[in-house]
Image: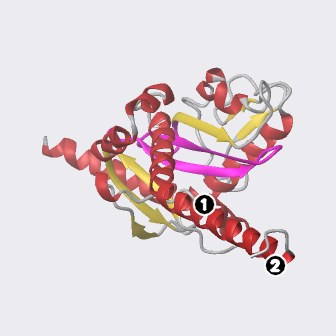
Amino acid sequence: MNTNSNVYTVIYTTVIVVVVAAVLAFAASSLKPLQTANIKAETLSQMMTAAGLGDSESFSSMGNDAVLATYSENIAEAIVVNARGEQIGVLKTDKDHIELIDNFKPENKAITEGGEPRLPVYKFKSGVTVIPVFGAGLWGPIWGYIALEKDLKTICGAYFDHSGETPGLGAKIKDEPSFKAQFNGKVLNLQNTKNPFDIVKGGAPEGSIDKVDAISGATMTCNGLDKAIDTWVGAYAAYLQSAAPAIQEAEVAQTVEE
């Protein structure tokens, strides 16, 4: 074949494109299980950091299998509820079959557009319950996990992350320990489903139990996180209010038996 002909050039180019595409497809397929495992371990690490079972650095050094094992050993139950507070499913928690709801975009859309969101609830053996939040920051999605005491309204831990907020400003929702520490001991106002919590620009009023200080210079990111918390906590409000009395009754019954 004439290597200088147009036909040769077309055939050569086609073969190269097909071979490269096949190699990329094989690589993507081969790496997908590892990518999925990494995402699952990262999600569990964030959740357990909020729950007070460790910090992000310690979980990062563990390796995926150890993170999954730690979660499985410490989780009591993981369920799915709807915005009416009704349980609609159960998530597996054994190490080799852990189930999560970590794609929050469709659930956020369902919440904001009056659909039927699937809201995960993670109950740990320590008595801490963890719920996620999700929304839009200045440059992309922001998300996190809020850990609640047995009364299901007092915050005992929080973890927040982002996909591209400004370093030194909006990125502080993840990088600044003092910002997250403010949430400890604060209380969700579950009676106000439209605005159960506030991140206040200029500083929360002294003595307020449902407000924290915004990050200076990161107004848009903090506004986005504030809206994310309001949106998702509002969606969980029916469940949190109905489940809290049941937890308290179970504790009283256990105390009586002892």
- The furthest residue to the left: 258
Q: Is residue 140 left or right of residue 67?
A: right
Q: Pointer 1: what residue?
A: 24
Residue 164: % across, % down: 75, 40
In depth, the one of 170 and 182 nearer the eye is: 170
Mark 1: which secondary structure?
helix
User: Would residue 152 be visible to someone looking at this image?
Assistant: no
- For badge 2, the amino acid type reads Val
Give the residue at x 77% y 48%. 140
- In the image, residue 47 sits, relative to residue 25, either above or below, namely above
- Quarter of the image that includes the N terminus: bottom right
- For badge 1, the amino acid type reads Leu
Residue 60: % across, % down: 46, 31
Q: Is residue 56 magenta?
A: no
Q: Nearer the viewer, mark 2 or mark 1?
A: 2
Quarter occupied by residue 205: top right
Residue 138: % across, % down: 83, 43
Q: Is residue 161 left or right of residue 215?
A: left
In depth, the one of 85 and 220 nearer the eye is: 220
Q: Is residue 144 magenta?
A: yes
The region drawn magenta spans: 126-155
Residue 7's disc number: 2
User: Would residue 17 be visible to someone looking at this image?
Assistant: yes
Q: Is residue 137 left or right of residue 257?
A: right
Classify 10 Å Cα crowding around label 1: few (below 14), some (14-19), many (20 and above). Answer: few
